[in-house]
Image (cartoon, rainbow, N blue to C red):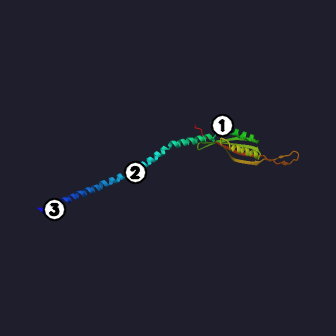
Amino acid sequence: MKILKQPINSERWLAVGLLVAVVLLIGAVLIVPLAGKGMELNEEKEGLLFKLQQYQRILAKKDAVIASMDKIKQQHDEQGYFNSQQTDALASAEMQNFIKKTIVDAGGQLSSTQAIPVSVKEGFSRITVRVRMTGNSDVLRAVLYKIETSTPLIIVDQIDIRPMRGRRSVLTHKIEQSNDLNVNFQAVSFMRKQPE
């Protein structure tokens, strides 16, 4: 009888071994891919969590950035670089009066001013005035300095300077030299485009 028990024992071990092999095979086919997918999802979750923390840090700074932008805008408005008139026509008229006063105060003579049609680019209106004046080099220097250091900001563009022809002397009938200059230039100022 002892001989019969041994093969049954080894058959049991063989059956148990096959069962373990089948369980391991099923585990390898089902559990390993699930575990791999779980690890992949965990890595994706960690990446998204990192991005979320970055966005939270950025959002935490939002109020400080908005406050800084408001402060910069307020400082910019206080500097008065842009013309603050309500319309382009008023801004042009104000600029013409300023230029006229500047030329007269410097001892020059204003020949004419002419408003050039306003052009709008990137939310700003470009107000341009064509100016003709006469005066000597000291007058011209004083006028240009006053215009370029004014508030709101005025830029001198397309300047043309020519010497004036001298006058003929009544006594000697010779042309006397003149220190005066004929000056043509454009003065340009900017204003924010008004909402329509």
For marks 2 and 3, the one nearer the N-term is 3
Q: Quadrant of residue 153?
A: top right
Looking at this view, name the residue that lies furthest to the left. 1
For marks 2 and 1, the one nearer the N-term is 2
20 sits left or right of 73 in the view = left
102 sits left or right of 167 in the view = left
For marks 1 and 3, the one nearer the N-term is 3
> What whole-number distance in Å separates the C-alpha atoms at marks 2 and 3?
53 Å
Contact check, label 2 and label 3, Cβ < 8 Å: no
* Residue at x 74% of width, y 48% of height: 161
Contact check, label 1 and label 3, Cβ < 8 Å: no
Callout 3 amino acid: Pro
> What whole-number distance in Å separates the C-alpha atoms at marks 1 and 3?
115 Å
The residue labelled by disc 3 is 7
* Residue at x 68% of width, y 38% of height: 94
The image shows residue 125 at horizontal and vertical percentages of 62, 42
Contact check, label 2 and label 1, Cβ < 8 Å: no
* Mark drawn on residue 90: 1
Q: Quadrant of residue 104?
A: top right
Looking at this view, name the residue that lies furthest to the front. 2
- Mark 3 neighbour density, 10 Å: few (under 14) some (14–19) many (20 or more): few
Callout 1 amino acid: Leu
128 sits left or right of 138 in the view = left
User: Which quarter of the image is occupied by the C terminus?
Assistant: top right
* Mark drawn on residue 44: 2
The image shows residue 181 at horizontal and vertical percentages of 77, 46
The image shows residue 32 at horizontal and vertical percentages of 32, 55
The image shows residue 26 at horizontal and vertical percentages of 27, 55
* Mark drawn on residue 60: none
> What whole-number distance in Å separates the C-alpha atoms at marks 2 and 1?
61 Å
Callout 2 amino acid: Glu
User: Which quarter of the image is occupied by the N terminus?
Assistant: bottom left
